[in-house]
Image (cartoon, rainbow, N blue to C red):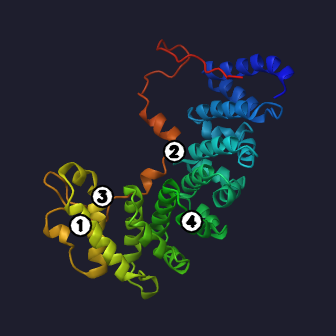
Amino acid sequence: MKPKHKSILAPIVNWLISGALILKGMSSTKTWITYLYTWKPDHLSSECLVDVQRIKDSKVESIDMANDLHSIGGLDPLLGYLKNSNAGIRAKATEVVSTIVQNNPKSQQLVMESNGLEPLLTNFKSDPSTNERTKALGAISSLIRHNQPGVSAFRLGNGYAGLKDALGSDDARLHRKALNLIQYLLHNNKADRSVATELGLPKLMIHLASSDDSLVREAALSGLLELAQDKTSANSLPDQDKLKDILKSQIEGISAMDSDNLHAAREERQLVDSLWKECYNEPSSLREKGLVVLPGEEAPQQLPPDVAGKMFETPLRAWAAAKPAQEDDSDSGSGKKDPPLMLKF
């Protein structure tokens, strides 16, 4: 921003943002959100734009606001931010998209109809920022989850090649996101197992099963278990000797854990035992040692815990879910209100 514009624009933007945060009426809120989404402040600094996006971000959690975005003209401008030259803007826009499509079939449909998957796939596969690649993958996961047209579009958009590249990266967060989406796709779309096998994903998953990151290990084991449960020869796991060595090493590590670490590694214990049984038709030594189900724990279900689903929840959804319920959401509530958030210039 040019210095001579700064003093004029700052109070205007602060006034707009304060109004957006103070007003509680749905119609008034829609008015403010419409203005913020359609306003084109290209002459403002990138830092200011990130703050404006954050304000939009916070309002998406309002009742029905996600579905109302399209009707008030906010969806297309939001998706346009996914192509912004500023990495911070792209990242914040991606977070908003993740929020509005999370467990929201109507919003998923609207985003798909507005071609929102395309820029997300582009950012996931080629964005220079690893952070944005990871956020884009999270948004894709939320968009196509329980959304078969989205899954089909992901497949046609060469999404699996992007997952392969993600598994070959050196970023643990990107590994976790990719592995959890792979596990979800393999579990819900049996035909995708052959696609994953042809692309060589199982070899990468076996490698990541020995990761230093426990969540990466769990996600890799979960995906491998999905493939191991498919008894067709075309989808058989490769590198069986390497996999067996990795599982043996994990069994040794688990056997040496103290009580606290054993309880923390519950899912990993069960996944290692289940995968061993699927691959070698015998219980693992963890079961013989009584380490699969510890005293006080419930026996695992026939299928291992879904380690993928919990990874798809966006930070905004988690924040909203953690907020205490209020009896009255009207304007006249007497509860304590947070002060308006002001932009810094």
Instruction: Return the disc, 3 or 4, that comes first in the chain's sequence.
Output: 4
Quadrant in the picture for residue 279: bottom left
Is there CB contact under 8 Å for labels 3 and 4? Answer: no
Residue 173 placement, left or right of 111: left
- Determine crowd level at label 3: few under 14, some 14-19, many 20+ residues with C-alpha closer than 10 A: many
Can you identify the residue that label 4 sits on?
163
Q: Residue at x 72, y 27 (%)?
A: 31
Front label number (4 vs 1) = 1
Q: Position of residue 167 (x, y in %)?
A: 52, 65
Helix, strand or loop at disc 4? helix
Residue 328 placement, left or right of 344: left
Q: Tell me the kind of residue under disc 3.
A: Glu
In the displayed structure, 2 sits above or below 147; it is above
Helix, strand or loop at disc 1? helix
Q: Report, in whole angstroms, how far the alpha carbon at label 1 lies from the one at label 2.
A: 35 Å
In the displayed structure, 259 sits above or below 344; it is below
Can you identify the residue that label 2 sits on?
314
In the displayed structure, 304 sits above or below 129; it is below
Instruction: Return the disc, 1 or 3, that comes first in the chain's sequence.
Output: 1
Instruction: Return the disc, 3 or 2, that comes first in the chain's sequence.
Output: 3
Q: Report, in whole angstroms, how far the alpha carbon at label 1 lies from the one at label 3.
A: 16 Å
